[in-house]
């Protein structure tokens, strides 16, 4: 938690841009969710980048090139509409800078209610996360 999936146009992210995007987006998500930048939270934030094949994505308008689709899946209650907008702006900037092109970037935030997220077979509980957050701020 959280999980981010980025669908990228073919060849939009050259070479080392994949790793740069993954780290930058993970850092942004943790920051906007107000989670500590600890090894635990960084390791629990997964960012997948899926590159589409040529011609596998299209828009409904002729000549309009498809862009990035970003789906952010956090546990419910960490983001507000204002934080979602700030996160979307930051992710857009990261992707456009990494690609060197002003592709459109669609960002969807799909919150998961407590009790509907499990890792390694165990439910992720807000109280446990709050405890981990508290422990990291006292160090």
Image: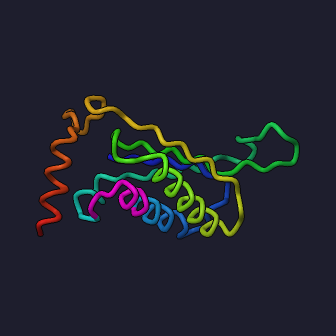
Answer left or right for 78 relative to 65: left
In the rendered image, which quarter is residue 27 located in?
bottom left
- How many discs mark residues in the rendered view? 0
Report if residue 48 lies within the magenta region.
Answer: no
Say which of 7 and 132 sits in front: 132
Say which of 69 and 79 sits in front: 79
Asked if 139 appears above or below 83 in the picture, the reply is below
Residue 73 spot, x, y in % from top left: 42, 42
- Magenta segment boundaries in residue numbering: 27-36
Instruction: Determine the residue located farthest toward the top in the rendered image.
Output: 116
Say which of 93 and 81 sits in front: 81
Q: Residue at x 30, y 29 (%)?
A: 116
Q: Residue at x 29, y 57 (%)?
A: 35
Q: Residue at x 82, y 48 (%)?
A: 64
Instruction: Determine the residue located farthest toward the right in the rendered image.
Output: 62
Asked if 60 appears above or below 21 in the picture, the reply is above
Answer left or right for 40 relative to 102: left
Q: Residue at x 75, y 44 (%)?
A: 55
Quadrant placement of the C terminus: bottom left
Residue 26 spot, x, y in % from top left: 41, 59
Q: Give the colouring mode of the picture.
A: rainbow
Answer left or right for 129 relative to 11: left
Asked if 122 appears above or below 8 in the picture, the reply is above
Task: Tell me which secondary structure the magenta stretch mostly adopts.
Answer: helix
Residue 49 spot, x, y in % from top left: 51, 52
Residue 85 visible in the displayed image: yes
Residue 9 visible in the displayed image: no
Say which of 117 and 17 sits in front: 117
């Amino acid at each position: 938690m959280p999980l981010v999936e980025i669908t990228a146009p073919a060849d939009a992210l050259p070479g080392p841009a994949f790793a740069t995007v993954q780290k930058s987006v993970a850092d942004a998500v943790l920051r906007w969710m107000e989670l500590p930048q600890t090894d635990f939270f960084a390791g629990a934030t997964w960012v997948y980048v899926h590159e589409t094949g040529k011609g596998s994505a299209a828009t409904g308008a002729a000549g309009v090139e498809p862009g990035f689709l970003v789906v952010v899946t956090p546990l419910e209650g960490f983001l507000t509409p204002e934080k979602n907008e700030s996160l979307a702006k930051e992710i857009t900037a990261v992707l456009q800078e990494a690609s060197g092109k002003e592709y459109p970037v669609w960002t969807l935030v799909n919150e998961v209610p407590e009790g509907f997220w499990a890792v390694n077979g165990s439910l992720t509980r807000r109280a446990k996360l709050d405890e981990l957050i508290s422990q990291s701020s006292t160090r």
